[in-house]
């Protein structure tokens, strides 16, 4: 008997054994499958657009959230201990940032003494109905918080210390950028015109030396309301 | 991989075919998953993971004879159930084929052969189904079952040898 013949018979035997097993499974009186609302939603989304559903399910949650951003947000938090251009005396206590816009990009470039302390835990106090905090990632100098509702719509809050050696930049995709005030703090609203993409609000708390970014499928009024409710949940130990 | 995803399930015809596969098979998949896992949440995960596999391998669908498709899909959902059981450490894979080698001597015909393979230890069945029916590579099987590629290869080879011994036996009726 050749290898090919053996493979062909193996194929047939396995199929027939599965057939017998499937027939048996149909007769078994086990627990019944009662789909939850979440499963039904997943199946509807899958049937509507299988490829999109697959891509969404394959991504880790933080990437799924980030993918929905109105802008492509890239953060370059450089390692602590970067080169300092100032003398220790000159840089002490100085906190500065510059926003530069050119082409399809906005850069926030920081200077000032590096902050090695852990960031406090901030959160959105007034979330839209149905949203809950799903995940929180804390890295040195940067924290990201993902909120999700039952439809897997995301709101993404990230914040970081502004200090020498770190910068943030936004790549715009035809977004409108307008100045906005979050309480007494200066900020920018980045409005996407790409269907399905979310909008973004960023503001700077100079007192705390922190830049906040809030991203979600919400308009300026709602995002502003959420931004104004961002408050301390927990201080670092 | 990205280019692959961009080409599958793009056309309306593909989506209709996918919807039809869902309609025909989802009930059976759900029944198998709940029977194996005994937990609604786990069963839903298994079914969803199985559909992810169906989408990933959608190009193969057209190459599978329609009469084989239900079993191809059953095999996928079973494997996803085993993956979940393995992660939860609710399944212990037995790696002993010696009993079956003894039983092989008493297999007189094709029906008994099918019965024997139906009762193979899961670790062998899974390897053989993934390799022979689903066309997974040893590396993919190794990752999914959490065993080494050498172990995958050994199981596949022993399974084939078992079949060969039976088929070569004098008086066996295929």
Image (tube, coloured by chain):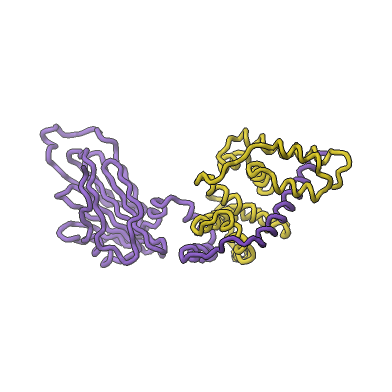
Chain colours: A purple, B yellow
Question: Which residue is painted at 63% across and 42% down in the image?
Answer: B123
Give the quarter of the image for residue B50: bottom right
Residue placed furthest toward the left: A89
Q: How many marks?
A: 0
The N terminus of chain A is located in which quarter? top right
The image position of residue A77, as x and y in percent, is 29, 41
The C terminus of chain A is located in which quarter? top left
The one of B90 and B137 positioned closer to us in this rendering: B90
The image position of residue A168, as x and y in percent, is 28, 47
Question: Which residue is painted at 64% across and 44% down in the image?
Answer: B122
* Left or right side of A229 for B151: right
The one of A189 and A227 positioned closer to us in this rendering: A227
The one of B47 and B19 positioned closer to us in this rendering: B47
* Left or right side of B48 for B155: right
The answer to whether residue A47 is seen in the rendering is: yes
* Left or right side of A222 for A53: right
Question: Which residue is painted at 28% across and 40% down in the image?
Answer: A140
Question: Which residue is painted at 21% across and 61% down in the image?
Answer: A228
Give the quarter of the image for residue B167: top right
The image position of residue A63, as x and y in percent, is 41, 51
The image position of residue A17, as x and y in percent, is 72, 51
The answer to whether residue B7 is seen in the rendering is: no
The one of B165 and A200 positioned closer to us in this rendering: B165
């Amino acid at each position: 008997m050749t290898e090919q013949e053996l493979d062909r018979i193996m194929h047939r035997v396995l199929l027939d054994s599965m057939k017998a097993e499937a027939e048996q499974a149909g007769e078994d009186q086990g627990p019944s499958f009662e789909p939850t609302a979440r499963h039904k939603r997943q199946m509807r989304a899958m049937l509507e657009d299988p490829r999109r559903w697959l891509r969404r399910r394959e991504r880790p949650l933080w990437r799924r959230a980030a993918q929905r951003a109105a802008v492509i947000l890239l953060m370059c938090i450089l390692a602590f201990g970067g080169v300092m251009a100032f003398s220790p005396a000159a840089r002490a206590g100085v906190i500065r940032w510059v926003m530069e816009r050119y082409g399809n990009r906005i850069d926030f470039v920081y200077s000032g003494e590096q902050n090695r302390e852990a960031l406090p835990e901030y959160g959105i106090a007034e979330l839209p109905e149905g949203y809950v905090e799903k995940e929180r990632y804390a890295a040195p100098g940067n924290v990201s918080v993902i909120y999700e509702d039952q439809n897997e719509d995301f709101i993404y809050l990230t914040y970081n210390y502004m200090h020498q050696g770190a910068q943030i930049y936004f790549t715009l995709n035809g977004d409108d950028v307008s100045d906005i005030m979050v309480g007494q703090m200066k900020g920018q609203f980045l409005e996407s015109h790409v269907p399905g993409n979310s909008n973004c609000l960023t503001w700077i708390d100079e007192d705390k030396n922190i830049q906040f970014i809030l991203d979600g499928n919400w308009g300026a009024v709602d995002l502003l309301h959420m931004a104004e409710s961002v408050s301390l949940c927990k201080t670092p130990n | 991989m990205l280019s692959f995803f961009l080409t599958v399930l793009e056309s309306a015809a593909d989506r209709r075919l996918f919807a039809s596969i869902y309609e025909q098979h989802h009930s059976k998949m759900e029944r198998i998953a709940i029977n194996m896992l005994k937990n609604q949440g786990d069963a839903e995960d298994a079914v969803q993971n199985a559909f992810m596999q169906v989408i990933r391998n959608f190009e193969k669908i057209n190459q599978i004879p329609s009469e084989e498709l239900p079993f191809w899909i059953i095999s996928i959902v079973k494997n996803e159930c085993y993956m979940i059981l393995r992660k939860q450490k609710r399944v212990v894979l037995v790696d002993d084929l010696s009993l079956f080698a003894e039983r092989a001597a008493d297999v007189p015909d094709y029906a008994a052969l099918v019965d024997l393979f139906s009762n193979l230890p899961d670790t062998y069945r899974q390897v053989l189904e993934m390799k022979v029916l689903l066309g997974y590579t040893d590396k993919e099987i190794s990752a999914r079952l959490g065993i080494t590629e050498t172990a995958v290869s050994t199981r596949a080879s022993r399974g084939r040898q078992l079949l060969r011994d039976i088929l070569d036996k004098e008086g066996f009726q295929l």
